[in-house]
Amino acid sequence: MGNGSNDVLEVIARCFAAPGAEVIYSQHAFAVYPLVTLAIGARGVEVPARNWGHDLAAMADAVTDQTRLIFVANPNNPTGTVEGEKAIRTFLERVPRRVLVVLDEAYCEYLAGDDDDTDGIGLLREYPNLIVTRTFSKAWGLAALRVGYAVSSPSIADILNRVRQPFNVDTVAQAAATAVLGDKEYLERSREVNRKGLAQLEAGFSDLGLDWIPSAGNFIAVDVGDNAQDVFEGLLQQGIIVRPVAGYGMPRHLRVTVGLPEENERFLDALKWTLGRRGA
């Protein structure tokens, strides 16, 4: 268990990487991967993305004798791209068993349930070098309570438990997480609101002549042009908070979280006004 999945990712890095070791992750992937790599003095190996997502073949090719960890976000944040089970299996078969693969499934509950959707936990018995991380902060709606977790082989879990802080998830958060796991109706409602919200935002972007990256998460990255920072600030002045992602190598995009229908509509109206005012 972790104080959010960020906590778990850091514990994994501290356990299994070290100064001089290599940690592989993708371009445009979650910012925590290079941050925890830097924090422990390891060397980050960023593999160029393919179509905004993970190039798993190139990531497997990047493995050297110094590689200790590989981080794979599925679905990926902030691009929303996703790799199917067949692609994940092919990748895992190519990775040496001495290298640990962290499959970050923070947004997995938003997947559509297609036959090729990856369930990392279901792969653990076949791949003992796999660690799956998940969180209650997204589809389950418990972000402020900070409950994340890793599922792995008992031997890996034993090492993680030696390094993690004691009592890192409080009793109230544990009780809430346990309770919400039984509320399947809430989870399905959350998924449905998200599916409709993504469609609403995509339709709005299309009306505005904007391109976006198809997303499997509860957010979407939209290309607003060369002045994305100006658009972000214009939205902020109207009380709309989105996320600029220039730091992820995406200077033209804004990452927009899916809201309720009226919130999505307010954002689209504000975006149209901002783009018009700034001549974007």
Image: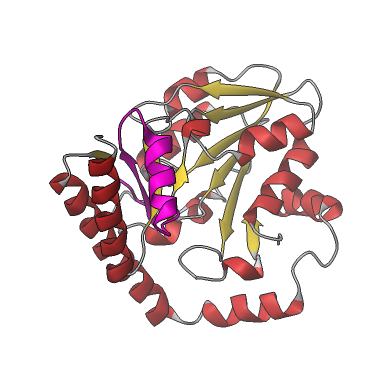
Report x, y in % for residue 173: 68, 75
Going by the picture, which residue comes out furthest to the front? 277
Residue at x 26%, y 42% (from the top left corner): 277
Quarter of the figure with the C terminus = top left
Residue at x 54%, y 44% (from the top left corner): 103
Quarter of the figure with the N terminus = bottom right
Q: Which residues are magenta?
A: 213-241
Residue at x 44%, y 29% (from the top left corner): 56
Going by the picture, which residue comes out furthest to the left? 207
Residue 100 seen in render: no
> In the rendered view, would you say 153 is above or below 189?
above
Report x, y in % for residue 229: 43, 36
> In the rendered view, would you say 115 is above or below 81?
below
Residue nearest the observer in this picture, 190 or 71: 190
Magenta stretch containing residue 223, yes or no?
yes
Left or right? Give the position of 120 relative to 14. Answer: left
